[in-house]
């Protein structure tokens, strides 16, 4: 059994990246590359459940919390044979963490993407991403969300009614452009997307291939929007800049623009990345 190191996006809304070191049913996770949480799970509870057991929920047990500055702080210990087996898995992950924590960012390994489609059956907003085809049977919410933080903190001069939070306006507007259908795609290394199964209709879309240009790199499509709502989306991306800069395949012009926006949020960047 091998150790995996990978990155995965946190979505709906996009709010950063989680980096994971995984061995068996133990994993170490971080969102900033500094503070790591290590968890183990008793996967033996799935024995005998067959394929259905792969979707059964088993509780994580906290192995510990680690940072280079403070070292390892252990979680609770349990005197049982089962826990000793979990301890062994946790120790493998912890020892590997000590060797590779400076290698963050890891490579993204979530090529299966669920997109909310517009009325022309084109990708409108990214809802979810997973690592394997077997995980596309999940049922996440099928409406796009700007997020609770956006409702409290995001501001835009594009909003005509300042009494309504900009995040609320943006959420309502993006969803008003949707057809109600969502589709899973498998993205290739060159960015093209193979259409997989759909949710809430659109069965005829399965098997299509869309070019990379069909998928908005910042996860919300602005094609066809009026000037005010295009400005609203761009202001939202500017507010998200500290998170957006974690994405690896941005065009140089896009990255430069996001860096300029992120400079306006220096305190947030310091809090998230250099605490």
Image (tube, rainbow, N blue to C red):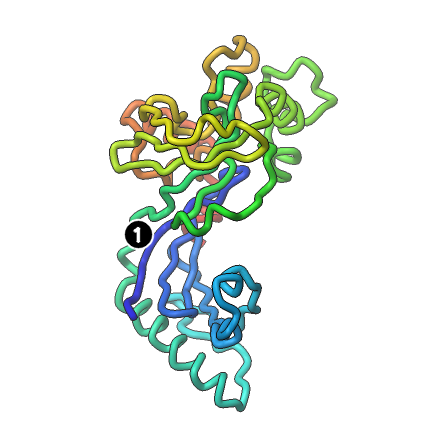
Q: Is residue 144 left or right of residue 261?
A: right
Of residues 127 and 92, the one nearer the viewer is: 127
From this view, report whether residue 119 is shown above or below residue 129: above
Picture mark count: 1
In the picture, measured across the screen, residue 154 lies left or right of residue 20, that is right
Query: As rendered, which of 246 and 174 lies closer to the eye?
Result: 174
Q: Relative to 133, is 35 above or below? A: below
- The residue at the point 45 percent across, 86 percent down is 84
In the depicted structure, whether residue 100 falls above or below residue 143: below
- Disc 1 is placed on an element classified as loop
Q: Residue at x 29, y 49 (%)?
A: 107
Q: Is residue 48 visible?
A: yes
Q: In the picture, which quadrant includes the C terminus?
A: bottom left
Residue at image mark 1: 106
The image quarter containing residue 149 is top right
Q: To which quarter of the image does residue 144 belong?
A: top right
The quadrant of the rendering that contains the N terminus is: bottom left
């Amino acid at each position: 059994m091998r150790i995996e190191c990978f990155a995965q996006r946190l979505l709906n809304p996009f709010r950063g990246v989680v980096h994971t070191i995984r061995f068996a049913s133990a994993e170490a996770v971080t969102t900033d590359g500094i503070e790591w949480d290590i968890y183990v799970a008793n996967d033996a509870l799935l024995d005998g459940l067959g394929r259905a057991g792969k979707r059964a929920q088993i509780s994580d047990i906290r192995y510990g919390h680690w940072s280079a500055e403070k070292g390892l702080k252990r979680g609770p210990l349990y005197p049982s044979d089962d826990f000793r087996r979990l301890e062994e898995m946790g120790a493998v992950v912890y020892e590997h963490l000590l060797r590779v924590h400076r290698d963050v960012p890891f490579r993204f390994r979530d090529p299966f993407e669920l997109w909310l489609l517009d009325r022309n059956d084109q990708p409108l907003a990214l809802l979810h991403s997973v690592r394997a085809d077997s995980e596309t049977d999940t049922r996440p919410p099928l409406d796009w969300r700007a997020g609770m933080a956006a409702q409290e903190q995001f501001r835009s001069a594009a909003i005509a009614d300042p009494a309504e939070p900009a995040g609320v306006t943006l959420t309502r507007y993006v969803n008003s452009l949707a057809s109600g259908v969502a589709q899973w795609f498998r993205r290739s290394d060159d960015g093209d997307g193979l259409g997989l199964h759909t949710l809430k209709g659109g069965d005829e879309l399965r098997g299509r291939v869309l070019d990379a240009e069909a998928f908005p790199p910042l996860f919300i499509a602005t094609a066809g929007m009026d000037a005010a709502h295009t400005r609203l989306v761009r202001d939202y991306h500017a507010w998200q800049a500290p998170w957006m800069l974690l994405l690896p395949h941005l065009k140089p012009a896009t990255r430069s623009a996001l860096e300029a926006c992120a400079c306006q949020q220096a305190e947030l960047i310091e809090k998230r990345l250099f605490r």
